[in-house]
Image (tube, helix red, strand yellow):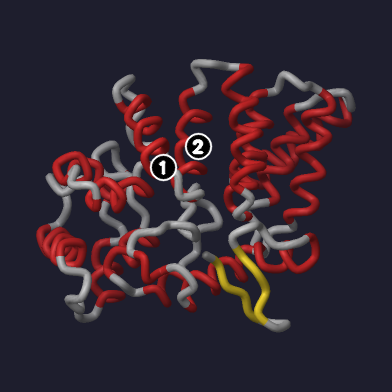
Amino acid sequence: DYRSIARKSAERALQLDPSLSMPWAVKAQNQQDEWPVDFSLALSQFEKAIAADPRNATAFLWRGIAWTKLGFFDRALADLDRAVALEPNYLNAVRHKALALLFAGKEEEAIALYESGFAKGFVFSRSENFIGPLLARGHRGEALLLMGVATMAPELRDALLTKLDHPETPIANVRALVERHASDPELSSETGNLTVTHLYLWLGDYDSVGSSDDRVTTTIVDWDRYPPTFRNSPGMKLKLEKMGVEAYWRAKGFPPQCRPVGGSDFTCD
């Protein structure tokens, strides 16, 4: 139970030295493994980490990821730029900046930044979010390699390629298909790096995207623009509700691309 070990270690570190920065960042990151996330608490803990050490690049990275999850891409980019300014070779911070740009709709800039890391051998962090955009832009070979089709079970590979090439084609029994292959180690290996959430997304089962449990993964699927019909689907909204994002919005305000619809619904551009 690494989450429990991390929490206890961070608390003990602060007992020994309350001036430390990283334990606060760890506590904040740990908050996000328990859904619905108390984002207000996590963000306040990131504030304490940064106040204790304004050069803690990882605290800026992790807070930037939290802002990305919440849909505040301008705030995410500000934090990620700060992380990269502090540590120019922090390739994971660069990659998360590319992701925030992608979700913000700045696709060309995002893909260029993604490929700059790719060229340095930094491949798989958040690559699953770039597979759809790369396919849409005609970068088929690169997208398929990132998907890991070389080692994927033929049944799953054929269904994915059918759906990605012809989105209008229904795939039968998606949940059973994914569950048959969810334990395949190749999906999380260096040649795959996929989670069941993205498999459901690409196969068009948005309800299963919403109900899948991403708490202990680093998956960020809510803001994916491919396939386009995912945006404002019940599955997208369920995921944001379960994660605690909607509750944060209603308490603190919505991001620029989203707005409330009545007291129990919302829509995002």
Q: Along the horizontal axis of the image, is 128 left or right of 105?
A: left
Mark 1 and mark 2: Cα distance apart in space: 7 Å
Type of amino acid under label 2:
His
Which residue position is annotated with label 1?
126
Residue in the foreground of this view, choosing between 218 and 225: 225
Residue in the foreground of this view, choosing between 251 and 58: 251
Residue under the image location 54 percent in, 74 percent down: 238
In the displayed structure, 218 sits above or below 122; it is below
Name the secondary structure under disc 2.
Answer: helix
Is there CB contact under 8 Å for labels 1 and 2?
yes
Name the secondary structure under disc 1.
Answer: loop
Residue in the foreground of this view, choosing between 32 and 87: 87
Which residue position is annotated with label 2?
96
Residue under the image location 64 percent in, 50 percent down: 72
Q: Along the horizontal axis of the image, is 179 left or right of 92?
A: left
Query: Label 1 crowding class (10 Å Cα cut-off): few <14, some 14-19, many 20+?
Result: many
